[in-house]
Amino acid sequence: MKIITNKNVLLFVCITAGHFLFAQIDKKATKETKNLYYNLNILSIRNILFGHQHALEYGHGWSNEPNRSDVKSVTGSHPAVIGIDFSDFSGQSKVQTEKAKQNLRKIVVDTYKRGGITTVSWHFNNPASEGGFYWKEGVSTASMALIKPGGSHHEQYKEILKTIADFANSVKAKNGTLAPMIFRPFHEFDGDWFWWGKSHTAREDFIAVWQFTVSYLKDTLGVHNFIYAFSPDNQFNSESEYLERYPGDKFVDLFGMDNYGDFGRDGKYDLESGLKKLEIISDLGKKKKKLAAFTETGLESVPNEKWWTEVLLKTLKTNDLKLAYVLVWRNDSTSPTHYYAPFPGQVSERDFVRFYDDPFTLFEKDLKDIYNKKLD
């Protein structure tokens, strides 16, 4: 037994290999992916990693500048977790898709070489209708039933997954190792705003597509550098509601949640409810020996100058939550108001530095060799 300090309480943690070998679903995962999975579990006992979507691609008032992020401009460090998106991997011209793959490949590999982590969302353009990834009444088709095995668009879906697999197997560092990624398909499926949302998709169809997606990528296409994240929005109040569309323990590595509504959206805060939902995914992770994470959150424009420490950090430190990371949404390059992380001069900048300085939060500079060895 080893005594460690965790959020001002003493925890007794068994440090045998069996305790920390969580149930990663891909038995053929690369060594680096297995080490990342293991180490995220270790780190989540005492800390949480901070992430930012599209942090390296663009920020408030800029885009496509090497090694720049708004978070680094404020703190001196990139986020520990960098969010990218596979949105351009379908529904675009071949030239557009190849350009997107080239740009993202550099971000993923460079992040891996610096010791950071990549997480991938997928705003999947509807393969059977116009309307993009959002549900547009009278335009969008309820397509999950069409892309599942036996569906009219299943072969087309397999080709899209081949594009993803080709990318996954191309993100190689100079030594030939593949950069691991946390892949988060069909997120916020309990809402109605995406075409794969709950009102547009039967439970059985959602589960069938999820199970096929994971199996086809890892077992047929040979993708072994993915960690698979399951992340509804916040439309649940119990474990049973959270698991209503759960595809099973053999198809999920990480329990996530996207939640903006409880953390200040439209000026409304319900931190008690937000904490309860985080406890549900944290407890599921512990019970099922899988990771858990706060996969999306944030407050647009961050008008609350102490939001980082008095809202987010205070919640994350409550009730012994065990979460691998928290990720806030993107900073648009042209919009004066659509941003979720501070930049120099933004009203919450000083509080974000306090958030950064807190020993509980980890940024890229704090990560030490998480791919090549297992942490104690």
Image (spheres, rainbow, N blue to C red):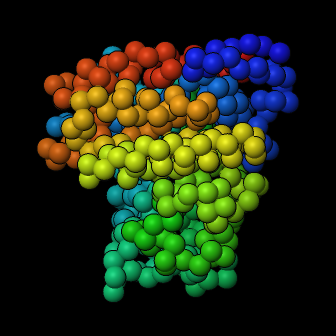
> How far across and how far down the image is residue 166, in percent?
56, 52
- Does the rendering let one see residue 185? no
Please report the residue visible at 40 percent of the width from the left and 15 percent of the height from the top.
357
Q: Is residue 282 left or right of residue 265?
A: right
Quadrant where the C terminus sits is top right
In the image, residue 141 sits, relative to residue 26, either above or below, namely: below
> How far across and how far down the image is residue 76, in percent?
33, 16
In the image, residue 175 sits, relative to residue 222, either above or below, namely: above
Which quadrant of the structure image shows residue 214?
A: bottom right
The one nearer the camera, 192 or 236, is 236
Which quadrant of the structure image shows residue 300?
A: top left
The one nearer the camera, 50 or 61, is 50
Q: Is residue 77 left or right of residue 207?
A: left
> How far across and how far down the image is residue 135, in percent?
38, 74
In the image, residue 233 sits, relative to residue 191, either above or below, namely: above
Quadrant where the N terminus sits is top right
The one nearer the camera, 272 or 244, is 272
Please report the residue visible at 59 percent of the width from the left and 78 percent of the height from the top.
202
